[in-house]
Image (cartoon, rainbow, N blue to C red):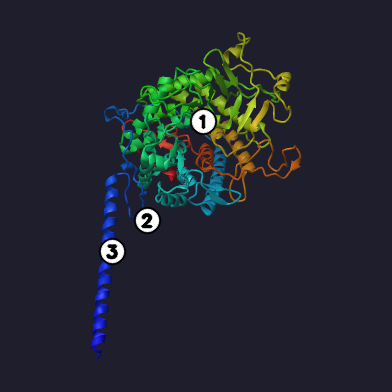
Amino acid sequence: MPGISDSFTTAAAFHSAMAILTARRFQRLALLTVVALVFYILLDQADYVAIPMVPKTGQYVQSTYDWARRRMKYPFDESKLIKLPEGIPRELPRIQYDFSQDEASESHIKTQKERQEAVKQAAKKSWNAYRKYAWGRDELLPEKLTGKDTFAGWGATLVDSLDTLWIMGLKDEYKEAVQKTATINWDKTTSSHCSLFETTIRYLGGLLSAYDLNGDQVLLDKAVELGDMLYAGFDTPNHMPANSFNFREAKAGSLRPSMGESSAAAGTLSLEFTRLAQLTGDPKYFNAISGVTRALEKTQDDTNLPGMWPVFIDVSRNEPENPIGAKGSSFSLGASADSAYEYFSKMYVLLGGLDPTYKKLHMKSMATARNHLLFRPMLPDLYPATPPDVLLSGNVYANGQDIIDLQPQVQHLGCFAGGMFALGGKLFHEPAHVKIGEQLARGCAWAYDAFPSGIMPEVSEIIPCPAPSSAPSSKDEEEEEFPRCKWDDATYKEANTAPGRYPKPFRAVQDPSYLLRPEAIESIFIAYRITGKKDLLDIAWRMFTAVQKATETNEAYTAISDVNVAPGEEQADAHGRGGTRSRTKNSMESFWIAETLKYYYLIFSEPDLISLDDYVFNTEAHPLKIPKPGKGAEGKEGLDTEKEA
C-alpha cells in the first residue's frame, strides 16, 4: 500500500490534472463558440458562404464564393428592368441552302467523310496532348509540353473544347472533361483578375453550348455560378461593363468601366448573357447587356463614321442617358471591334426576331462598312482565266468632317466578316449582302493561297483597286458594286518599299505569324452552308492541309511565326541570312480546338449537323440553341451526334 504522503501527492496530482483538463475543455468550448460565431456572421453577410463538400467523380462541386448572394453596390432600378421580349418566336427565314435538292455521288460522300475524319484525328491529337501535359490548365505549350495559365487558370481549353468533343462524337473524352469541369472553383484563380470579355465567350459560352447540346445539368449549374460572377462586372456607377475584372474589386463593388475600352469587349457579351437568361428565367442577365445595346443604339449615328463605332470607346461616362463616348477616329471590322458587329444579327436570331433593335444596328453598320471599309484588291496577271471574285475588309480613318480614308490593312481576325455579311443577308432578305459575304470569304481563302505556307498572315497591307472616279464603262462594271481593275506594275513598285519580298499585291506584312486562328474557315463554312457551292469544300480542304503541314508538332499543333516561309524551308534571320531560328511560337490557344477544328469538321459533315437554322454560334464558335415557335425561350432539344455525325 502507498503511504500517507504518497496519497496526498497522488491526490494533488489528480486535482491538478483535472484543473488542466477543465481549462482545456473551456478553451475548446470557447474556440468552438468563436468558430460558430464567425461561421454565422459569414453566412449572414450574404457575400460569403462556407460550403463544406467532399467532391466525388462527376459530381457538381459548388464554388467557395457565392456571387449570387453578393450585394450590389449600384443596384439596378427594379422598376426599369429590361426583360426578355415576350411573345412566340417568329418563323425566321431559312438560312441554310437546301442540300436535299442535290444528289451527291458516292465518291463525293466518301471524300468528305475522309476529310472529316482527318480533322477529327487532328482534334484528338490536340486534346490528348492537352490531357497528358496540361490537364486543367488554360492551354498547352505544344513544344515544351507543359501547361500555361492565361485566363485565370480555370482550364480554358477544357471548357472551350466541351462542345467540340461532343459534336465529334468523342464521348469518353467529353465525359471526362465534364467531370473535371464540375469541380471548377471560380474563386480559385491564378491571377488577380480576368477579362470579362474572354471569360464570357470562352468559359460561359462553352458551358452554355455544351448544355444546349447534351443537357448535362452540372454544366448549367456551373454556367449560373460563372454568370453570377460576371454579372458583377456591371455593378458600376453607370452599369456599363468593366472588362478588367479584378476579383477583389468586384466583390467590393469598386470596379470601374474604362475610358478607352475596345468596342468588342463592351459589345460582345449579349449572346451568352441572353442565353443564360433564357435557360434560367432570370431577367437580370438580359437586363445587364440591354443597357449596352441601348447605349450603342443612341450613339450609332453620332460618330465620326455614322453607322459604326470607333475601335475604342469611352464606357466610363456617368451620364445615365448617355453612358458611352464614341468620338474616336479609327474604324475597323478587325481586332478590338469585330464581334461587336457580329452579335447584332445573331442576337436577332437568338431572340426569335422579337427585338427589331438588333436588325437596325446590323443593317446600319453593314451599310457603313460596305461603303467605306470593303475593297477589291488589285490582282496580278497570274490567272489564265477570269481573276477570282474577291473582296477584303480594311480600316478607315475618319475625322468626322472631311476625311474618310481607307487603310487597306487586312487582318486575319477580320476574315469573320464574310460569314457575318452572308448570315445577315439571308436573315434580312439582302441578296447583295450574301454575295458580299461570299466574296469576302473567298478573299481570305485567296490570301491563304498567296503565301508560300498556304496560310495568310495575321496582319498585312494590300494594294487596293482605286475607287471609281467616273461612270462605268461597260455593262459588266455596272453589275459590279466593286469594279475590278487591271494590274499596274508602276503602282505596285511605288507603293511597295521592298518589291518581291511578299507575294503580289501585298505591299507590307506587319505581323507574319499564324496563331491557329479560325476566322477564315469560319466564313468559308458559313458561305458553304448558305450557298451550297461545292468548290468551297475543296478550298476548305486546301486550307486545312496547309495549316496541318505548317503547324503540326510531334504531339500537338503550334502557332507559327512566319507564313511567308514554306514548311521545311530555312528561315532567314533578322539580317536576311539563313539560320535555324524556330518558326514556331510554342502556343496552342484554346480556340484551336474550340473554333478552328470545329469549323473544319463541320464543313465536311452532313449539313444538318449543327444546322444554321437550329443554332447560332457565339464568337468562340459555341453553338447556342435557337428558340423556335412552340418550343418557348429555351428551344431545348438535345443533339444526338451518333445519329447526325
Query: Callout 3, which amino acid?
Result: Gln
Residue located beneath label 2 in the image: 55
Residue located beneath label 1 in the image: 336
Question: What numbered label is drawn on residue 27?
Answer: 3
565 shown above or below 422: below
Sequence-first disc among 3 and 1? 3
Residue closest to the eye, 408 or 16: 16
Sequence-first disc among 1 and 2? 2
Q: Residues within 10 Å of mark 3 (few under 14, many from 20)?
A: few
Please name which of the two marks, 1 or 2, marks the residue nearer to the observer.
Answer: 1
Q: Secondary structure at mark 1?
A: loop
State the image coordinates of residue 291 (x, y, percent, origin top left): 37, 27
Q: Residues within 10 Å of mark 2 (few under 14, many from 20)?
A: few
What's the CA distance linking mark 3 and mark 2?
Answer: 32 Å
Residue 313 seen in the figure: yes
State the image coordinates of residue 500 (x, y, percent, origin top left): 74, 29
